[in-house]
C-alpha cells in the first residue's frame, strides 16, 4: 500500500491539532516510506522512499563500553536509525558493577552513551528505550536514575523478566536517530 493512501488519524481533528504534524514510518520488506500528514488537510507528502540493503548497515564497536557477551554487535547504524543492543551494568573493562540498582542503571546509561557517541549520535537523540528488570520492585530506583539521563522523555517500555544475562538486575537497550 502506498503511503499516500493513509488516512489522517481522527485524534488530530481537534482544536489543538494545528501545531501537530504526524510522521508515519512504515517498514515494508526492503522499503522505507516516511510520510507526513498535515492535520488541516487530507494530503500526505512522501519525504523518503528508498530501498534498504545490507550495505546500508554499519556495525558499531567501541572500547568505551563492554564487549558483547554473545554473538551480536554493540549497535547497528543505518541511514535512519541506530539500534543499540541491551547494555548491562558491566564496565568497559569487564567488571560487574555491584551495589544499588541506581549504580547499576547509571552504568547501563554510561555504556549506552559510549556506544551512541561511537555511532555519531547521543542520548538526546534516543527515541525509544526498552528496559528489562529482574524485579519490578527495582522500578522506582531505576527510574530515578533513568530520568536524569533521558530528560527528553523518549518512548519506553519496561518489563520484569525471569533472568537477564549474567544474572544482572537491569538491562537497557535503545533506538536513536543518527
Image (tube, helix red, strand yellow):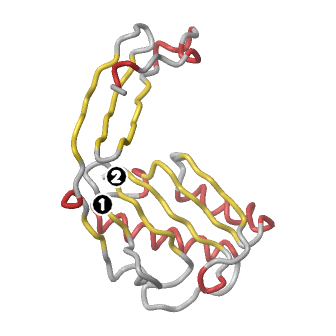
Q: Is residue 47 above or below residue 7?
A: below
Q: Position of residue 143 (x, y in %)?
A: 67, 59
| Tag 1 secondary structure | strand
| Tag 2 secondary structure | loop
* Residue appearing at x 36%, y 24% in the figure: 36
Within 10 Å of the Cα at label 1, are there few (<14), some (14-19), or many (20+) other Cα atoms?
Answer: many
Q: Quadrant of residue 139?
A: bottom right
Relative side of 11 to 85, left or right: right
Say which residue label 2 marks: 81
Say which residue label 1 marks: 77
Q: Is residue 67 above or below residue 154?
A: below
**Which of the image's four quarters has the N terminus?**
top left
Q: Quadrant of residue 114?
A: bottom left
Q: Are the residues flagged by discs 2 and 1 in contact, CB closer than 8 Å? A: yes
* Residue appearing at x 22%, y 44% in the figure: 51
Relative side of 100 to 2, left or right: right
Within 10 Å of the Cα at label 2, are there few (<14), some (14-19), or many (20+) other Cα atoms?
Answer: some
Q: CA distance from mark 2 to mark 1?
A: 6 Å
* Residue appearing at x 44%, y 25% in the figure: 22
Amino acid at each position: 500500500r502506498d503511503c499516500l493512501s493513509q488516512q489522517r488519524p481522527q485524534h488530530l481533528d481537534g482544536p489543538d491539532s494545528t501545531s501537530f504534524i504526524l510522521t508515519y514510518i512504515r517498514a515494508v520488506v526492503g522499503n522505507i516510506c516516511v510520510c507526513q500528514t498535515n492535520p488541516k488537510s487530507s494530503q500526505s507528502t512522501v519525504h523518503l522512499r528508498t530501498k534498504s540493503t545490507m550495505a546500508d548497515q554499519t556495525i558499531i564497536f567501541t572500547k568505551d563500553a563492554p564487549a558483547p557477551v554473545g554473538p551480536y554487535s554493540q549497535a547497528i547504524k543505518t541511514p535512519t536509525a541506530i539500534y543499540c543492543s541491551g547494555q548491562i551494568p558491566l564496565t568497559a573493562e569487564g567488571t560487574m558493577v555491584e551495589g544499588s540498582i541506581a549504580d547499576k542503571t547509571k552504568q547501563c546509561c554510561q555504556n549506552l552513551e559510549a556506544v551512541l557517541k561511537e555511532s555519531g549520535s547521543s542520548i538526546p537523540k534516543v527515541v525509544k528505550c526498552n528496559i528489562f528488570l529482574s524485579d519490578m520492585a527495582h522500578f522506582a530506583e531505576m527510574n530515578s536514575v533513568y530520568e536524569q539521563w533521558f530528560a527528553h522523555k523518549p518512548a519506553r517500555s519496561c518489563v520484569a523478566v525471569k533472568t537477564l544475562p549474567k544474572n544482572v538486575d537491569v538491562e537497557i537497550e535503545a533506538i536513536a536517530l543518527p
